[in-house]
Image: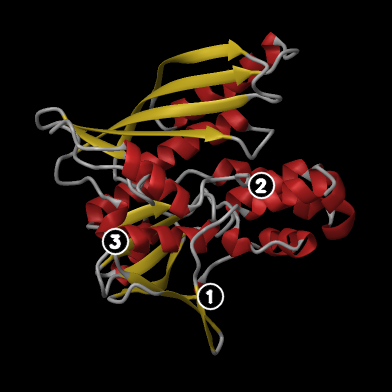
Amino acid sequence: MLKIGKLSNQQLERILTRFSGKLRNEVLTRPCIGEDCAALDFGGQLCVVTTDPITGAESDIGTLAVHIACNDLASSGAEPVGLMVTLLVPPGAGLNQIEEVMSQIKKEADLVNADIIGGHTEVTDAVTRMVVSITALGKARENRVVTTSGAQPGDDIVMTKYAATEGTAILANLLGDFLEPRIGRETVARAQQLIGSISVLKEGLIAADYGATSMHDITEGGVLGAVWELCHASCCGAIIYKENIPLLDETRKICACLGLDPLRLISSGSMLITCRDGNGLVEELQEAGIRSCIIGNITRDKQCMLADGGNMVKIDPPESDELYKARKLFLEGE
């Protein structure tokens, strides 16, 4: 039986090996673990495409859907142009619920300067709550597309903003009643507002211009999962320094209360960027008002290691996100 969450990397590798292949010369990138976008060459103009559903959240799903998709484009250095929206609506839902989700999508689409260009909406008993999936189309210059697979030994690994921002916001909204008496109403309220801080579009475009060798937005599996995927795609390794990974106080308190590892918690709102001069990129991002820091380095061997005080701990491939552990324990009563 399959686990809730993403397929394991072994399972996904099996699917990709069997069912993907090279047919068209216009397709510049091929599907692989850790690579979230496809780049297509239409005669000098590059179209970058990505798609993602929202399945782990129940509130603000329109907001999340836009930024999750556009963050993937940002990790390729692409600017969003259009969004295709698919809504699967459970029986019994009202038209007002669809309008609320679409209102969120339109608001965030305007913020990232992208048009809603089509999609599909239907009511189906295949779902028990509304599911949103967005396919985002972007544009990039031919010499500017950045892949997850471009990291090189000696590169600095720069991380923007804070780990587990998205997971913190989702958990605060899902489990607010449980968390408030334990960590305080004000802490929960601040965490809930983090849902508005999950875009990495700005830093993606800045880093692409700066000369990033690779980028990967941090989603399911958290910071450590994203590091492993980036290194796997680039056929290299990394040393990550745990003490350098920034966490908000709200994240520390919520994860401690729920018994979760914040470094394995879904983290949209933060980007991993590799480049030759990490300090220079940090300065560039700082000038744009984006917090960032160097959390480690790319190594020649293929081992991903976490330096935790005096200990070196191997970073394993990502499994089911910590968010699903919390949902199962607190919402399903297991």
Question: At 75% from the left edge and 47% from the top edge, which residue is drawn?
Answer: 328
Residue 64 on image: x %, y %: 56, 36
Are the residues at dot 2 and dot 3 in contact (C-beta closer than 8 Å)? no
Q: CA distance from mark 1 to mark 3?
A: 22 Å
In this picture, residue 151 sits left or right of residue 174: left
The residue mark sitting in front, 2 or 3, is: 3
Helix, strand or loop at label 1? It is helix
Q: Which of the two residues, 120 or 282, is positioned nearer the viewer here?
A: 120
Q: Can residue 189 be seen at all in this image of the molecule? A: no
The residue mark sitting in front, 1 or 2, is: 1
Q: Which residue is mark 1?
A: 242
Instruction: Name which residue type carries label 2.
Output: Ala
Task: Choose the circle earlier in sequence order: 1 or 3.
Answer: 3
Q: Which of the two residues, 295 or 31, is positioned nearer the viewer here?
A: 31
Q: Which residue is mark 2?
A: 169
Task: Choose the circle earlier in sequence order: 2 or 3.
Answer: 2
Residue 11 on image: x %, y %: 46, 49
Q: CA distance from mark 1 to mark 2?
A: 22 Å
Instruction: Name above or below for residue 111 compared with residue 169.
Output: above
Question: At 50% from the left edge and 52% from the top edge, which residue is drawn?
Answer: 8
Q: CA distance from mark 2 to mark 3?
A: 31 Å
Instruction: Name above or below for residue 56 compared with residue 307.
Output: above
| Location of the N terminus (image quadrant) | top right
Task: Choose the circle earlier in sequence order: 1 or 2.
Answer: 2
Callout 2 crowding tier (Cα within 10 Å): few <14, some 14–19, many ≥20: many
Residue 320 on image: x %, y %: 60, 52
Residue 156 on image: x %, y %: 32, 71
In this picture, residue 131 sits left or right of residue 282: right
Q: Which residue is mark 3?
A: 234
